[in-house]
């Protein structure tokens, strides 16, 4: 039997505990409502101590926001992986689509959590804080792709903001009407903003020449 490195085992253990806490928290929060659930109830449901909880999360808000935290990294990575000559609107649409697809892939649970976040002011505030970070990361990647200086050019940050505004609109519409197709909403949203995203990019930047 091949032994695994201690670091790998520790990481797996941490991931299992974090997942158990996340699952327990989301189940309780969606069922009971954000204000009604305490950290003690979350730890009891997960079968861990309160001290263990605070090793992973600073508050119950963090547990919920973590559900969508990886979306930002996923958008950035997808944008970086898009073909270099692809128009910005297409690259950004695929970047946003990757996160929408990841969310919609667990539709029942994801929709409940999205509704919880969008309809709970403290969670919405934390989600918007994360999006401010995402905007900077997307802007930096756009600037790299287009050969722009983000400290000088306005386009990267504005384009990233437009893409995230589309993302917010998609989530809001999906939250309001759970029967709509998020992928179809993504296509419609980017059809609206594509002319603005592509028209301000110089031919040289858009073609990579």
Image (cartoon, helix red, strand yellow):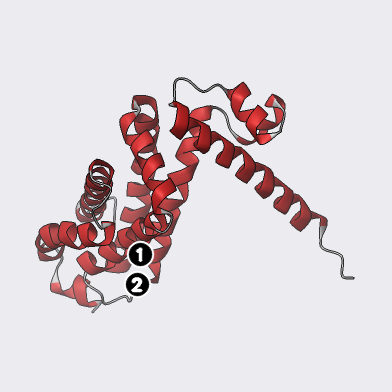
Q: Is residue 128 left or right of residue 201?
A: right
**Residue that protrudes farthest toward the right in the picture:** 1
Quarter of the image for residue 185 reads: bottom left
- The image's mark for residue 82 is 2
Helix, strand or loop for disc 2: loop
- Image-quadrant location for residue 18: top right
Residue 8 in the image, given as x and y percentages of width and height:
75, 57
Query: How far apart are the two marked residues, 2 and 1, measured between alpha carbons?
Result: 5 Å
* Residue at 20% in and 65% down: 89
Residue lying at 25% horizontally and 55% vertically, measured from the top left: 156
Q: Secondary structure at mark 1?
A: helix
Nearer-the-camera pick, 1 or 198: 1
- Label 1, on which residue? 79
Residue 126: image location, x then y, percent:
40, 32
Residue 99, can we see it? yes
Tag 2–tag 1 contact (CB < 8 Å): yes
In the foreground, 85 or 5: 5
């Amino acid at each position: 039997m091949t032994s695994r490195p201690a670091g790998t085992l520790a990481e797996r253990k941490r991931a299992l505990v974090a997942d158990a806490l996340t699952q327990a928290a989301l189940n309780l929060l969606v069922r009971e409502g954000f204000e009604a659930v305490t950290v003690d109830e979350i730890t009891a449901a997960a079968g861990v101590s309160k001290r263990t909880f605070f090793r992973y999360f600073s508050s119950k808000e963090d547990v919920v926001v973590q559900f969508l935290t990886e979306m930002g990294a996923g958008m950035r990575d997808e944008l970086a992986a898009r073909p270099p000559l692809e128009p910005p609107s297409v690259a950004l649409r695929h970047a946003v689509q990757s996160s929408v697809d990841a969310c919609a892939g667990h539709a029942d649970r994801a929709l409940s959590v999205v509704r919880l976040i969008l309809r709970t002011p403290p969670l919405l505030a934390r989600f918007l804080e994360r999006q401010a970070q995402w905007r900077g990361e997307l802007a930096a990647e756009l600037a790299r792709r287009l050969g722009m200086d983000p400290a000088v050019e306005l386009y990267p940050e504005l384009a990233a903001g437009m893409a995230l505004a589309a993302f917010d609109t998609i989530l809001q519409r999906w939250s309001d009407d759970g029967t709509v197709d998020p992928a179809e909403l993504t296509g419609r949203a980017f059809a609206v903003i594509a002319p603005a995203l592509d028209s301000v990019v110089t031919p040289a930047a858009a073609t990579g020449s």
